[in-house]
Image: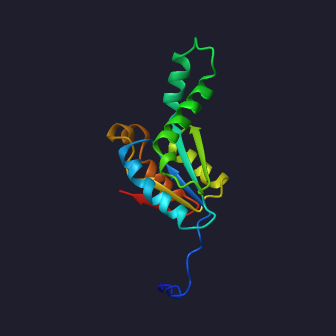
Amino acid sequence: MTTASAPAPADSAPAPFHHVLYCTDFSENADRAFPYALRAATRNPGATLHLLHVIPEPSAQFWKGYIYDLDEDVDAMARREIDQKLADAYRPRLPDDLPFVTAMRIGEAAQKILEYAAEAHIDLIVIGRQGAGAGTRLLFGNITGRVTRRAPCPVLVVP
């Protein structure tokens, strides 16, 4: 026989979020999740908003092999392009007093999101329900589902 646990007392409040992680693949769906991440960070004084973009490993390896004649480090070039995209898409929407961190990882998206969440002591992950499209879901699987099942903290999934 199982028993239901007693509800939390009405006066107990959830712990504040100190580190909010917003995951983006720059899709329209990911962009819809941004205001929720921003709100979570701004409603928790002293919180830091982390913006993370993961480049899938197959894409990264393809471009590294294809652009062999560049004099410049491909990873450094990719990092600058991602930083610029993050700056263009999200920086203008951030309050001046909100601390934020931008990060880029290369690899399997769900795994890299979970690793970053653990490394940065993330208290809340905000992620869109779907990625860049059906092809992405078929190729890489359900990233959001894997993140929500394995996350070390609450996950807010925005449809």
Residue at horizontal 59 percent and vertical 70 percent from the top = 16
Residue 46 picture location, percent across and down? 64, 64
Nearest the eye: 70 or 144: 70
Residue found at the very far left of the displayed protein: 134
48 with respect to 127 (left or right)? right
Depicted 138 relative to depicted 97: above or below: above
Nearest the eye: 96 or 4: 96
Quadrant in the rendering for residue 47: bottom right
Residue at horizontal 51 percent and vertical 16 percent from the top = 66
104 with respect to 88 (left or right)? right
57 with respect to 116 (left or right)? left
Depicted 136 relative to depicted 14: above or below: above
Nearest the eye: 98 or 26: 98
Quadrant in the rendering for residue 131: top left
Residue 159 picture location, percent across and down? 35, 56
Residue 111 picture location, percent across and down? 56, 46
Residue found at the very far top of the displayed protein: 69
Residue at horizontal 48 percent and vertical 86 percent from the top = 3
154 with respect to 132 (left or right)? right
Residue 56 picture location, percent across and down? 50, 35
Quadrant in the rendering for residue 75: top right
